[in-house]
Image: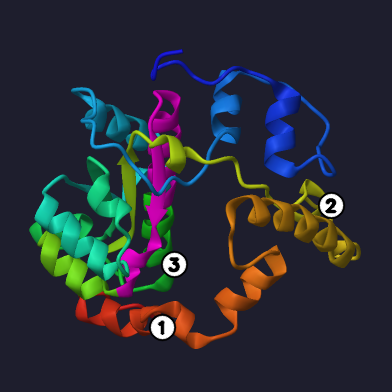
Amino acid sequence: MDSLTPPPVDTTEALTRRYGADAVPPAGPWNETIAVMLDHRSVRSYKPDPLPPGTLETLIAAAQSAATSSNMQWWSAVAITDPEKKKVLAEIAGGQKHIEQCPLFIAWVADMSRNQRISDAEKTAFETMPWLETFMVACIDAALAAQNAVVAAQSIGLRTVYIGAMRNDPIGVAKLLDLPHQSFVVFGLCVGYATEKGDGEVKPRLPQSTVLHHERYDAANEAAQRKVYDAEMSRFSARHELQAATWTQRVLNRLAPLKSMNGRETIRASLAKLGFEIR
């Protein structure tokens, strides 16, 4: 199988890998696109191999095909291949070496500056610009676009990992990338070919019965479902020698101590310095 061939379409196997043998949902309509999506895993070890010509443009075309609120297109992307810049970004991200390894790193920007320039050029005050809703829409637009790019990348044999740690130092990232005011890197994305070790396996997710509700929200069985998922994640963690064995422990480790935010608790102040007036 060459790198441009999607993985084989095997419904039962794909669903079992995604949920574990104890929580496989009923199989429904299926095709290679869905198979590619269920085969997603975050990869943190990349080969130095260059990407085929036109790969970046293909990924951006896929990204621009995502839904965008009222066609406002509140996002931009900055493609980074310069080793020195990737090194700085890796340091900002707490030493994540895969940022340096991957041949392509994309910074996904919630970009309100472009529409602000229209406001300035047309001498028309945009009264909706300072509100939280507008900023949220810009971040959502960027996320939708990036996820389209991720699916496109996977479909041609590439692997990815999102880097939320760009928010550790939004001002430092903005300066490095020469962003205009009212622009904010929501996250970065590593793109490349996974090493054999880095490709790993699909990480199990919560059972559908935990996240899918019918007609009304119902968490009555959540504790029992979480226990089943914790057991599945414990087996996954043992295979990969991960410190936090269960999902519950991961949640406790990530959300209990403020230090786990790695500086992101100051984002509101950083946004103000980046020119955002959020009401």
In the rendered structure, which disc, 1 or 3, sits on the residue that comes first in sequence? 3
At label 3, the amino acid type is Glu
Give me the C-alpha separation between circle 2 and circle 1.
Answer: 35 Å
Looking at the image, can residue 67 be seen? no
Q: Are marks 2 and 1 in contact (CB under 8 Å)?
A: no
Of residues 115 and 263, which is closer to you in this image? 263
Label 1: state its secondary structure.
helix
Magenta stretch, residue numbers: 143-168
Give percent across and percent down for residue 81: 15, 45
Q: Is residue 105 left or right of residue 278?
A: left
In the rendered image, residue 48 lying in the magenta stretch gets the answer no
Q: Is residue 207 left or right of residue 99?
A: right
At label 2, the amino acid type is Glu
Label 3: state its secondary structure.
helix
Q: Which residue is mark 2?
A: 215
Of residues 70 and 257, which is closer to you in this image? 257
Q: Pointer 1: residues within 10 angstroms few (<14), some, or many (20+)?
A: some
In the rendered structure, which disc, 2 or 3, sits on the residue that comes first in sequence? 3
In the rendered image, residue 154 lying in the magenta stretch gets the answer yes
Q: Which residue is mark 1?
A: 265
Image vertical order of residue 150 relative to residue 143, above or below: above
Q: Are marks 2 and 3 in contact (CB under 8 Å)?
A: no
Majority secondary structure in the magenta region: helix
Give me the C-alpha separation between circle 2 and circle 3.
Answer: 26 Å
Q: Which residue is mark 3?
A: 133
Q: Pointer 3: residues within 10 angstroms few (<14), some, or many (20+)?
A: few
Q: Pointer 2: residues within 10 angstroms few (<14), some, or many (20+)?
A: few
Label 2: state its secondary structure.
loop
